[in-house]
Image (tube, rainbow, N blue to C red):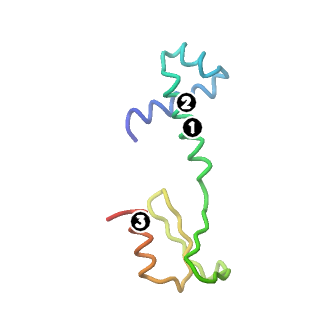
């Protein structure tokens, strides 16, 4: 995390805890309203994308039971649930997209 990002996130947390409007908070803390708005939007957007997203790869899909799934964590950012019979080639392609090597 860069210093700029850390500072932005700290200001958003402090603003939310303060109960002040964005305008008032920024005036009192000599912080840019556009920066506070951006970091607030970014943090809210991250929260909306947390969790799992189902991805289908063409053809007919069938529901697999949890017992036939493998869970793979890529860093702290991605968690993939993969069917045991998922193609190794397809998995390499997915990993190349999310974590280019």
Q: Mark 3 points at which residue?
A: 97
Task: Name the residue rendered at 49%, 28% in the picture.
Answer: 35
Task: Name the residue rendered at 43%, 36% in the picture.
Answer: 5
User: Dot 3, crowdedness within 10 Å: few (<14), some or many (≥20)?
Assistant: few
Marks 3 & 1, CB-CB < 8 Å contact: no
x, y (%) of residue 84? 54, 83
Give how far apart the Cα atoms at labels 3 and 1 are.
25 Å
> SS at mark 1?
helix
As displayed, is residue 11 above or below residue 84? Answer: above
Q: Residue furthest left?
A: 101
As displayed, is residue 56 above or below residue 5? Answer: below
x, y (%) of residue 69? 59, 78
Q: In which quarter of the image is residue 56?
A: bottom right
Marks 1 & 2, CB-CB < 8 Å contact: yes
Instruction: First in sequence, mark 2 or 3: give its number.
Output: 2
> SS at mark 2?
helix
Give the position of the C terminus as an image quadrant.
bottom left
As displayed, is residue 14 above or below residue 73? Answer: above
Give the position of the N terminus as an image quadrant.
top left
Q: Quadrant of residue 19?
A: top right
Q: Residue furthest top?
A: 28
Instruction: First in sequence, mark 3 or 1: give its number.
Output: 1
User: Dot 1, crowdedness within 10 Å: few (<14), some or many (≥20)?
Assistant: few
Q: Name the residue under label 1.
A: 41
Marks 2 & 3, CB-CB < 8 Å contact: no
> SS at mark 3?
helix
x, y (%) of residue 93? 41, 73
Q: Which mark is residue 37?
A: 2
Q: 94 or 85, which lies in front?
A: 94
């Amino acid at each position: 995390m860069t210093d700029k990002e850390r500072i932005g996130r700290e200001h958003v947390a402090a603003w939310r805890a303060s109960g002040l409007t964005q305008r008032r908070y920024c005036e009192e803390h000599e912080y840019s309203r556009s920066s506070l708005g951006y970091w607030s939007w970014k943090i809210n957007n991250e929260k909306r994308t947390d969790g799992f997203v189902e991805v289908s790869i063409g053809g007919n899909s069938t529901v697999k039971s949890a017992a036939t799934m493998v869970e793979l964590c890529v860093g702290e950012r991605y968690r993939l649930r993969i069917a045991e019979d998922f193609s190794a080639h397809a998995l390499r392609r997915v990993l190349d997209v999310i974590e280019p090597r």
